């Protein structure tokens, strides 16, 4: 059954059956129990009528999946799929969703072979019931507790009330995983979740290893590298850390009870783009795209390599940080900037004259770079709780190549390199440079293309 058929049936039901059942949905049930399975054609509905779970075939493909979508909603938008990698083929249809003999919720094909199961240990088999919560979580529970929740097994969509993140102690991580294509919900190449860094940030990964995009570190109320999120969605996201439990959880807050009944749909596309779209729940028309990441070349992680700076408004968009030059002029001139840049004038402490860069101004100082997305590979220095002590720490340790003092975080320092810098209305970064470079102050200030200004 495709979206149109479903719409048609829903309309049919509303018109014909409304008066009979005084309910506005057809074949809709509110729970699955050991005595009542959900069969193909029926749906399980949340009590607030916002979410619906049922059987669907993307773009009239031959495969059937069990999914959750926004009820009575156009365009048909699936937010979670149970059997992503195990579709039920036409030959094996119809299927049904039942409470199995071991108390788990199971998807059975026409031959009653199990295609998918919640697969948890359950003590008693006679009291399991599955419901769809008002937030769109499929929940299997018994008389006393919840046994399994779809919110703990995220798909490609981040629903308000669900949590992404990780548990440092158990090693578990909860991420969004893209579909393979618009019509194939099987697990794709892109994931979205919370990084292992301290402070955490959110990121999109390719094949769970390579970073595609990162948000910049979380600063209590916002991600430092997502400037537009700061103003319009101050409280859309929150990160909650529980040191005792070892958990870091990203929360996404959207109130469905807002006056206009606007739904915000946050998901990762099959091509790896994190997308926030919204629309009124009872109105026609397509989703309105509110925000996407990555949106530009400079949003893509490390486009211009270590010590490079990316500015989408310039051509070329790539440049070296002040005091640095292309690592390979040959690659650079061919338009390959991934090798990044190298320091032009060595710092004397690098040459190990004293082993310790003890005095400010000896042969290097800090150059202030205004308003940038803070680079990756930062470290949090918890002991340096004001700007001066942060600067002092960095100055006195020759391995420290840059620092930033960020409201909501504190002292961040960089030892290993600076990668993924782009100009945003974000934070100030202080870069260690040799005096020979800082001496070019006047020149730099006059240079409109230079993103640097000098501090003192
Ligand atoms: C399941 O739904 C039916 C009808 O809405 C209701 O009577 C029944 O109490 C529910 N059972 C459970 C276990 O929630
Ligand atoms: C529940 O489990 C018992 C023993 O484990 C089994 O005999 C019984 O058939 C099961 N009941 C259902 C409804 O599957
Ligand atoms: C369900 O199982 C529990 C414990 O296994 C048992 O005490 C209870 O009588 C059972 N209820 C029914 C309706 O079978
Ligand atoms: C369905 O197919 C059309 C045309 O092939 C495509 O544009 C659309 O994105 C597909 N939608 C889904 C949900 O697969
Ligand atoms: C992910 O890895 C697979 C297998 O190595 C590869 O075929 C695919 O191209 C990778 N995806 C991306 C987006 O690079
Ligand atoms: C909406 O508000 C009602 C009544 O205040 C409440 O019972 C319900 O849980 C809320 N639903 C959501 C999704 O916030
Ligand atoms: C770009 O340069 C890097 C090293 O600087 C090299 O490893 C890579 O192969 C180059 N890529 C292309 C497409 O030439
Ligand atoms: C740097 O200098 C210090 C003090 O002179 C010395 O102990 C140390 O071994 C040197 N380190 C290197 C890497 O040369
Ligand atoms: C400089 O910082 C690095 C990294 O934190 C540390 O390993 C090293 O001991 C520090 N050096 C000094 C002289 O404090
Ligand atoms: C980016 O480039 C544009 C165009 O040259 C320039 O106006 C802007 O100041 C640059 N941004 C930064 C932060 O350097």
Image (tube, helix red, strand yellow):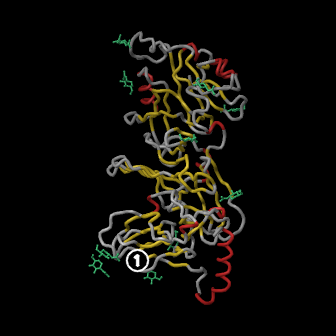
Residue at 51% across / 79% down in the picture? 29
Of the 4 image quadrants, the one containing the C terminus is: top right
Secondary structure beneath dot 1 equals: loop
Closest to the observer, 206 or 365: 206
Within 8 Å of ligand 2, the CB of disc 1? yes
All told, the count of numbered labels is 1
Tell me residue 395's x, y (percent).
44, 22
Closest to the observer, 313 or 140: 140
- Quadrant field for ligand 9: top left
Closest to the observer, 397 or 339: 339
Residue at 50% across / 38% down in the picture? 406
User: On screen, 437 above or below 384?
Assistant: above
Tell me residue 62's x, y (percent).
62, 63
Question: Is disc 1 surrounded by few (<14), some (14 to 19) or many (20+) residues within 10 Å?
Answer: some
Tell me residue 359's x, y (percent).
43, 16
Q: Hey, which residue is sitting farthest top in the picture?
A: 353
> Left or right of 206: which side holds 391?
left
Closest to the observer, 389 or 129: 129
User: On screen, 130 above or below 233?
Assistant: below
**Quadrant of residue 157 in the image?**
bottom right
> Left or right of 401: which side holds 241?
left
Tell me residue 77's x, y (percent).
62, 63
* Residue beneath disc 1: 34
User: On screen, 166 above or below 103?
Assistant: above
């Amino acid at each position: 059954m495709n979206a149109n058929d479903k719409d048609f049936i829903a309309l049919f039901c509303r018109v014909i059956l409304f008066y009979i059942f005084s309910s506005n949905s057809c074949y809709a049930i509110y729970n699955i129990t050991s005595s009542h399975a959900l069969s193909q054609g029926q749906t399980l509905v949340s009590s607030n009528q916002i979410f619906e779970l049922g059987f669907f075939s993307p773009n009239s493909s031959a495969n059937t999946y069990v999914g959750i979508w926004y009820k009575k909603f156009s365009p048909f938008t699936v937010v979670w799929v149970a059997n992503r990698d195990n579709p039920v083929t036409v030959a094996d249809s119809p299927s049904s969703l039942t409470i199995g003999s071991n108390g788990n919720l199971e998807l059975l094909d026409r031959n009653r072979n199990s295609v998918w199961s919640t697969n948890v240990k359950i003590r008693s088999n006679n009291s399991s019931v599955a419901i769809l919560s008002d937030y769109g979580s499929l929940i299997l529970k018994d008389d006393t507790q919840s046994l399994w929740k779809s919110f703990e097994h995220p798909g490609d969509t981040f629903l308000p009330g669900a949590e992404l993140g990780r548990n440092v102690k158990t090693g578990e991580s909860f991420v969004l995983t893209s579909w393979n294509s618009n019509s194939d919900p099987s697990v794709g190449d892109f994931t979205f979740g919370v990084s292992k860094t301290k402070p955490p940030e959110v990121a999109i990964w390719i094949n769970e290893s390579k970073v595609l995009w990162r948000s910049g570190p979380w600063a209590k109320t916002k991600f430092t590298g997502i400037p537009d999120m700061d103003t319009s969605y101050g409280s859309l996201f929150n990160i909650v850390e529980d040191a005792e439990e070892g958990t870091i959880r990203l929360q996404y807050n959207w109130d469905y009870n807002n006056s206009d009944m606007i739904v915000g749909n946050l998901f990762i596309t099959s091509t790896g783009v994190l997308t926030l779209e919204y629309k009124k729940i009872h109105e026609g028309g397509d989703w309105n795209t509110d925000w996407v990441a990555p949106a530009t070349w400079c949003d893509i992680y490390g486009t211009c390599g270590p010590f490079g700076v990316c500015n989408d408004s310039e051509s070329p968009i790539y440049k070296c940080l002040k005091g640095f030059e292309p690592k390979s002029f040959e690659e650079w001139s061919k338009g390959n900037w991934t090798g990044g840049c190298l320091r032009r004038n060595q710092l004397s402490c690098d040459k190990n004259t004293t082993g310790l860069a003890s005095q400010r101004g000896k042969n290097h100082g800090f150059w202030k770079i205004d308003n940038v997305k803070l680079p990756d590979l930062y470290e949090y220095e918890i002991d340096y709780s004001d700007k001066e002590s942060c600067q002092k720490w960095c100055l006195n340790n020759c391995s420290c190549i840059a620092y930033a003092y960020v409201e909501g975080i504190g002292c961040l320092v960089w030892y290993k390199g600076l990668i993924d810098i782009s100009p945003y209305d974000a934070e100030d970064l202080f870069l260690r440079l040799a005096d020979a470079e800082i001496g070019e102050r006047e020149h730099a200030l006059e240079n409109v293309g230079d993103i640097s200004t000098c501090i003192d």
